[in-house]
Amino acid sequence: MPISLLAGDYVDDINSSTAVRTSGQQVIYEMNVGSFTQAGTFVAAQQQLDDLKTLGIDIVWLMPIYPRGTSGSPYAATNFQQTNPKYGSIDDLKAFVSRAHELGMEVWLDWVPNHTATNADWVTSHPEYYAKSGGQMIHPNNYGDVWQLDYNNAGLVDAMNDCLKFWIDQCDIDGYRCDYISSSWIPVSYWQNTIPLIKQYKAGKNITFLGEADIAQDVTRLKTAGFDYDYAWHFQGSLANYGSAGNASARLKAFANTLLDASKTVDFGRMLYLTNHDQNFNDGGRTLTKMYGENRYPLTVLAYSLYGMPMIYNGQETGGNQILDYFADTKIDWNAKDAKMCNTIRTLAALKHAVPALSDDTPVEWVTVTNNSSVLAYTRKSGDSQVLVILNMATSASNATLTGLDAGEWSLWLNSETIAQGAGRKQQTLGATQPFTLEAKGYRVYVKGNFSEEEPPAPEVYTPVLDSADEISIFFETPTPSSYSAWVWGTLGGGEAYCTNTSWPGDAMSFMGQTATGTNVYKYTITKVSEAPQYLIISKDNGNTKIYDGVDFVNHGYYVEGNATPTQVITTTGIESSFQRQNPTDSRVYTICGQLMDGRQPLRPGIYIQNGRKFIMK
């Protein structure tokens, strides 16, 4: 389940506000309902909307929620006026939207105007709705699971518009993300007629249209189509090309200037992103780390603070290091936490919400950086509001001097060196010429003026401990947060694997916490055998990368990435608690490290929140 933040701070206060955000302040989240929770339903996703609100999300874009064709693709729908039965009913979706509205959030549906599944209801009930060649229906782009719709047919146009109206009537949705609008089969005139029709459909109801295309630079014929947002597709492609090895600020600045210049030619908003379902799964399966390496952190800052509406993809707040097969609705591994990424994202959202200088119509002014070609800096100013963003793309700590700054009092809202601990805010006096030292791939965001100072919380240090004296387990320490799996085997019973999941890559390891130096500790406990196995493999990226391969299994061994043998063996069992519940059958729900626990369960060491109160288990 999504990360539940454990302590309120100024970032939470800003993001939790239900104030109406303008188009230049919004953050959008692409959600696949089937992946978002273990249940994969509207009801389960609704229960996690508060977490998205705290993360700073204003708009939830739901990937297609319609019944699917035989291929399993959500973009091959069989009926545009029904929901996928695995997700729940139309009433369940309506309740999801209603709760989002209570939180001040919008819900947009993914609309697939170009085609339907080959076994869609219309194939038999309205074959005239489909384009044909030689009397045969057409597979667009050779996609064998879909048939091309024919927009020369007036009945099809009316039927599609009725479907758009249907979801407004049934569920009060707020907008549409429109798939494959660059299709040559859909005339510009369709959008020119349909978008105003739907916008005017219900008095007092604002409907927003996001088009899946880079209209500003690519599909320029759609500039007059009426979309409210397009994709900054070329910018994302440039960042992906910059990748994990990029370190030159000039190259990054050139990408940004191309985006900004293209945006001046259009009168609609633009959506910026580092990844989405296509980059993550379709394009050979690429996690954030695979695409960007450590650059994923400063590039996230760039995408949020440069221009436009930033988009977060399904589980990106965990670090985005999981490939999600959206055909099969692969579940997000919420145990694979990345506190640095999560806290960076939610702080950037708070900046977007609270600082007028980050509105879309605020120009970017590049700051002169001397004696360092890897540091990029810029300011944005609107009236009395001003932000300063500094990014170090180098692979080592860097010194840089910035000139031409607006001297005076500034507030440091985002500091890469402390953000993994949590949000903080610190006043600093900057001169017109100011030297800075930034860590490798480091970043800082300042806001001009005086604000209350807030120290980031002290890091919570995890102490390895055995849940019971007779368990069989191992611990794994790594600097890289990810989704790790353990595969263990031996001679007992014929050499079979001792994993609960006997298919590769075995069982998921549980994230336990961080060391005093900020590295991550994972644990794997065997519950099905009475004696320790002989060998161990630890892998990540769904088994694609092996950290350890066939090393000796040491019961309760503490393995550190890079060392072939354990550095210690854990012997401590259990830790006394400083917080005792009055009633052992207490059924209240507590939150620990992003996981909900029933009060009847034994509470592990950590920070708990219950009824708004904080408890520390020691």
Image (cartoon, helix red, strand yellow):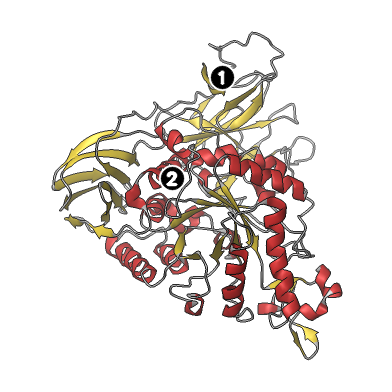
Image coordinates of residue 548 in percent, x first then y, are: 56, 44
Determine the residue positioned at 31% across, 65% down. 251
Which residue, as the protein is rendered here, is positioned at the far right?
A: 124
Q: 174 or 489, which lies in front?
A: 174
Q: Is residue 3 left or right of residue 148?
A: left
Q: Nearer the viewer, residue 516 or 255?
A: 255
Circle 2 — which element? helix
Left or right: 10, with 497 as reference point? left
Q: Is residue 143 above or below residue 506?
A: below
Residue 10 percent across, percent down from the top left: 40, 33
Q: Which type of secondary structure does the marked residue at label 1 adopt?
A: loop
Circle 1 residues within 10 Å: few <14, some 14–19, many ≥20: few
Measured as percent of width and height from the top left, residue 295 is found at: 39, 53
Depth-wise, is mark 1 or mark 2 nearer the camera?
2
Amino acid type, mark 2 = Ala
User: Which picture quadrant has residue 489?
Assistant: top right
Residue 547 percent across, percent down from the top left: 54, 46
User: Mark 1 or 2 closer to N-term?
Assistant: 2
Q: Which residue is mark 1?
A: 571
Q: Is residue 66 left or right of residue 263?
A: right
Q: What's the residue at 47%, 43% (across, down)?
A: 480
Q: Is residue 550 visible?
A: no
Q: Amino acid at mark 1?
A: Thr
- The residue tagged 2 is 349
